[in-house]
Structure formats: C-alpha cells, structure tokens
Amino acid sequence: MAETTALTDIRLAVRQLCAKFGESYWLALDKDRGYPTEFVQALTESGFLTVLIPEAYGGSGLGVFEASVIMEEVCRSGAHAGACHAQMYVMGSVLRHGNETQKKHYLPKIASGELRLQSFGVTEPTTGTDTTSLKTTAKRDGDDYVINGQKVWISRIEHSDLMVLLARTTPKEETQKKTEGLSAFIVEVGKAVGQGLEIRPIDSMINHHSCELFFDDLRIPKDNLLGKEGQGFKVILDGMNAERILIAAECVGDGRYFIDKASAYASERVVFDRPIGQNQGVQFPIARSYAEVEAAWLMVEKAAHLFDAGEPCAAEANMSKMLASEASWRAGDVCMQTHGGFAFAKEYHIERKFRETRLYQIAPISTNLILSYIGEHVLKMPRSF
Ligand SMILES: Cc1cc2nc3c(=O)[nH]c(=O)nc-3n(C[C@H](O)[C@H](O)[C@H](O)COP(=O)(O)OP(=O)(O)OC[C@H]3O[C@@H](n4cnc5c(N)ncnc54)[C@H](O)[C@@H]3O)c2cc1C
C-alpha cells in the first residue's frame, strides 16, 4: 500500500532520530543491562512516543497505524523498542477507562514526558497465562484499597512513574463469570516503593528491565481505581489489540532489519571466489523471509486500520502478532545462518536482535493462546479451556 506524504515524513523523521543512537549504543546497554534514558527522552520530546494521546491532552492524536510505523522504524534501525513501547499502549487504559479527573491529571503529563507510564502489572508466577485466576487481591478499606500478592516479569517498572495494576477485588467463586471481580488501578510507583511494594529485578536473556513485585498491604487511594470496580479485565483487554498490533509492527521492523543485514552481507562476503549470496542456498532463504515479513506487514496494516476506524479487530490484531513474530524469528535465523560464525560476534549486533525478537512468540501473549483464540472465536471450534 502506498504511504501518504505525512506518513513518509514521520518514517523519515523517526529514522533520523534513531540514527543518532547507533547500534553500539544498544550493544553497550545490552552488556551493562542499562536503560536507554537518552533515547526514550528524545523519542518523547519529539512527540513520537505519545502520538496516541489526543490533542486535547497534549498528544498528537494520531492512530495506531501511525504508531505502528514509528515502532517499525525504531526496530528496523537496530534499536530495542521493548524499553519504551508500553508508554504508547498502556496509556490507552487511562484514555478509554479513566474518569475526566484522571485523564486531565495524567495524560498531559504523560504527553510532556513529565510522567512515564511504562509499566503494566498483570502476570503472576503461579497463574501465568490464566489471567482470571490471578491471586493478587485489592481489598477496600476506607478511602483506600489494600493490595497483597505477587507479580512477575513486570517490565520497566524501575523506569516508570506509573503502573496499571490488575488485582482481584471479588473472589472468583463469588462472581458469575471468571472475568468479573478483577479491577485495574493506577499505581504511583514512587509513592508505593517501600510502603508495601518491593521490586526485585530479574536477570534475563534480554535487556527488558523486567522485575518481580511483592505487595504487602500496599495502600492505594480509591480514586486510583481505573474504570469500574470488578470490570478491570475489560480495562486491560481493551488495550490488548493496540498492544498486539504495535508489537507486530516491531517484529516487522526486526524482520526488515535482519533482511537488510543478511542481503547486504550475502552480497559482499566472498567465499570460494564468489559472493555467498550468488549461491541460491544462501539467497533463497533471505528472499523467502522477505516475502514472509512483507506479508505480515499487510496484516499489521489491516489490523491497525480496523482499530483506527473503531471496527472489531481482535482476530486481525492477534493474527498480525503471530505472523509477524514468527516471520521476524525466521528472518533472524536466516540472518544468523548467512553470517556464519560472525553472527556470534557481538559487534555484528545480530545475536542481540535475535534474542530480543524471540520474546514476541511468548509475550505479551504466546502463540498457542492466539491459535486458541482463532480456533474458538473465528472458526467457532470447541473451547479448549
Ligand atoms: C521479557 C518479558 C517481559 C514481560 N513483560 C511483562 C509485563 O510488563 N507485564 C506483564 O504483566 N507480563 C509481562 N510478561 C509476562 C508474559 O506476558 C508471560 O510470560 C506470557 O503471557 C506467558 O505466561 P507464562 O510465562 O506464565 O507462561 P505459561 O502460562 O506458564 O505458559 C507456558 C507455555 O504453555 C502454553 N500454554 C499454557 N496454557 C495453554 C493451553 N491451555 N493451551 C495451549 N498452550 C498453553 C503457553 O502458550 C506457553 O507457551 C513478560 C514476559 C517476559 C519474558
């Protein structure tokens, strides 16, 4: 699909910004487990990270499609968007479900970069994908809710001022549907740490700044309830389509990064007196991967346009995420193979991106759960769980 001039302008501007943070910047952060503070700041100041915030609240009020193009460019440049992507989509929970006071208080500050909303707390160690079985509780006590429980893999919380948290306000046994009785809250992280919230970083395969959280009688003002009590699953679910589409766009960016690298290297690396890319055994996997990544982008476009038109898009959002994450992983594998032994040298950057893109077949939702959604909701086959 041909891009509009405005979109091409966004693409080029993001590309220019990313070029200031070369691959050695990301390599150094990966080695030291550092956070890309300067990059996130530049992306926020340029307005790219807050495009989804309406103009009335200080953002530029663009759609998920424009946001997808931004994240795709970020990843294609060699950057690791995982450090900041949540600032785009977690905000949607506040925008769609916050009351006017919450929106006026938080959204302009998120748009200006004064507040970072980079974190969402859903996953728990003992319940995993089975979100409605989560065990963290929020009990009303006077003007507060008191939170107890544990979360795992909560990313960027050490670099975020706010977190959207999902906890149970009514025991599952007392609800008619398992999706009821969960509530979402805005947690002001700075006020919570040491007052009932403990954060422990997880040493992990990629530099994703993920942590374990322990809640011990953390008090949150009742005014920080996001949406209606008991309806928190919907608050979280509503943001998931945007999240899936943006992650899919990132995977397409990763895929294009791998293909750019692989095709360039295959054209210049000479073995047996010929460029390795002259051998079809090297050339065809790269060409196949290109076709897969570009096909995945078409599903990203479709899902994003449906989302922006306010149409149902859960199937397309899920499919875009599955297709793009699988295509980027295969492109990474092809890129590794094309580079031979040099693929393992950190200075070539490929192994870092290879590790980073692997995440997206698991988080924020794993491929099996997407297949199950398609099987049950699109193809109307029997429910499996
Ligand atoms: C780096 C990283 C960052 C993350 N960031 C966040 C974050 O910021 N916030 C947050 O809340 N969470 C975050 N997560 C958690 C992530 O969303 C979960 O890891 C993911 O949803 C899978 O849950 P699980 O790890 O508990 O796997 P499990 O639920 O234990 O599943 C394990 C495997 O079994 C499969 N499986 C499970 N049940 C079924 C079934 N019924 N049918 C078929 N297959 C099944 C799954 O597909 C998966 O492959 C992050 C995870 C990682 C690794």
Image (cartoon, rainbow, N blue to C red):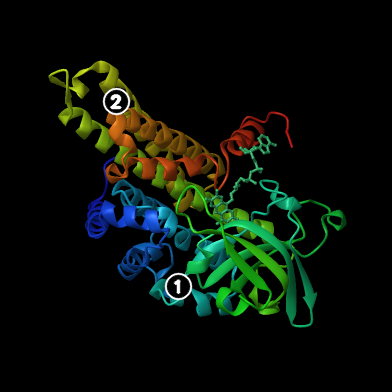
Q: Secondary structure at mark 2?
A: helix
Tell me where residue 327 sits by quadrant: top left
The circle drawn on residue 287 is 2
Tell me where residue 230 sits by quadrant: bottom right
Q: Quadrant of the C terminus?
A: top right
Q: Earlier in the sequence, mark 1 or mark 2?
A: 1
Q: Callout 1 environment at 10 Å: few (<14), some (14 to 19), or many (20+)?
A: many
> 212 or 132, which is in the foreground?
212
The image position of residue 120, as x and y in percent, is 57, 61
**Pointer 1: what residue?**
110
Q: Residue at 74% of width from left, 82% of height from top?
A: 143
Q: Residue at 73% of width from left, 30% of height from top?
A: 382
The amino acid at mark 2 is Ala
> 1 or 40, which is in the foreground?
40
> 177 or 210, which is in the foreground?
210
The image position of residue 221, as x and y in percent, is 68, 79
Residue 283, placed above or below residue 237: above
